Amino acid sequence: MTSKRSEDRPEGDRIAKLLARAGVASRREIERMIEDKRIAIDGNPVETPATFLTSLRGVTVDGKPVAAPEPTRLFAFHKPTGLLTAERDPKGRPTIYTALRNALPKGAPRLMPIGRLDLNTEGLLLLTNDGGFKREMELPATGIPRTYRARTFGEVTQEQLESLIDGITIDGVHYGSIDANLEQRTKNAGGRNQWIQVTITEGKNREVRRVLEHLGLKVSRLIRTGYGVFELGDLPRGAAVELKKHEIGKFRSQIRQHRRS
């Protein structure tokens, strides 16, 4: 028996989902483009993101027809510090796309970052042309681990770090289970510096920094070294490389396994 809700639901998918899948922009950006009347169907501006379509036939963006979705492609980029993970910045600060102009091979599609790294965080940033894949990889419910190395100043014990495995609430914000381990320590005249490896699965805004600062540590450098099955490895800073199709398949298998667990 079909429920009333499914009977009432229009056929197809929301236009923002289809356009994101086609690599036009993220869903949020597409909603802004609809507000700005930049998206049309058969010449008529789309009035609402709640527009359901079975295909993108007749859909234009800035007057140009939308091409059929390309196969999913995935790139790894070693983001340096000092770059915003954004397409543009009102203040005119450099973004990842400034560096990607020279880092990406010719013929690379329009790419969207999977998640974000803040201005002063460096390391592995994945980019894809597939908006649906991007969303799937970003959802906290997917449980994809993100691993960081943090250089910190201050005193902390392994026992304190291990307590984070149960999660922690800071200023009313709850952070789920965090796997943190002391990597190495070096003494200096003013105290202790240490490298700490941190693995999270939620990826909340500035999560690693806030948690370590809550423990009384000052974070002087933060590097993302892994995202799911992908690792930064020896990819040079500012460089980008395309990942193989079988690696994308491996990643999707990881997501399916998590959902079954």
Image (cartoon, rainbow, N blue to C red):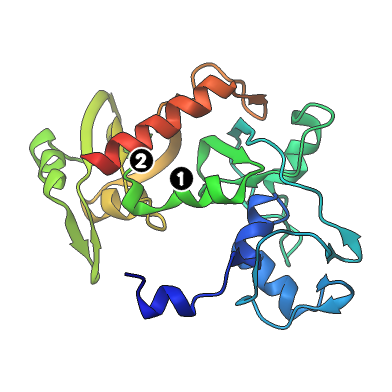
**Quadrant of the frame with the C terminus:** top left
Which residue appears at 58% of the width and 20% of the height? 235
Question: Mark 1 falls on what kind of element?
Answer: helix
Which residue is denoted by mark 2 in the rendering? 144
Few, some or many C-alpha atoms within 10 Å of disc 2 (few <14, some 14-19, many ≥20)?
A: many
Image quarter of residue 170: bottom left
Image quarter of residue 108: top right
Which residue is denoted by mark 1 in the rendering? 137
Which residue appears at 84% of the width and 28% of the height? 106
Few, some or many C-alpha atoms within 10 Å of disc 1 (few <14, some 14-19, many ≥20)?
A: many
Are discs 2 and 1 less than 8 Å apart at CB? yes
Q: Residue 135 location, x and y as percent?
A: 50, 52
**Quadrant of the frame with the N terminus:** bottom left
Which residue appears at 27% of the width and 48% of the height? 212
Find the distance from the CA under tag 2 to the CA under tag 1.
7 Å
Q: Is residue 181 left or right of residue 91?
A: left
Q: Is residue 98 above or below residue 39?
A: above
Q: Amino acid at mark 2?
A: Ile
Q: Is residue 145 above or below residue 210?
A: above
Image quarter of residue 252: top left
Q: Residue 56 location, x and y as percent?
A: 75, 59
Viewer-proximal residue among 59 and 24: 59
Which residue appears at 64% of the width and 56% of the height? 20
Viewer-proximal residue among 81 and 138: 138
Q: Residue 152 location, x and y as percent?
A: 33, 38
Question: Mark 2 falls on what kind of element?
Answer: loop
Q: Is residue 58 above or below residue 197?
A: below
Q: Residue 253 location, x and y as percent?
A: 39, 30
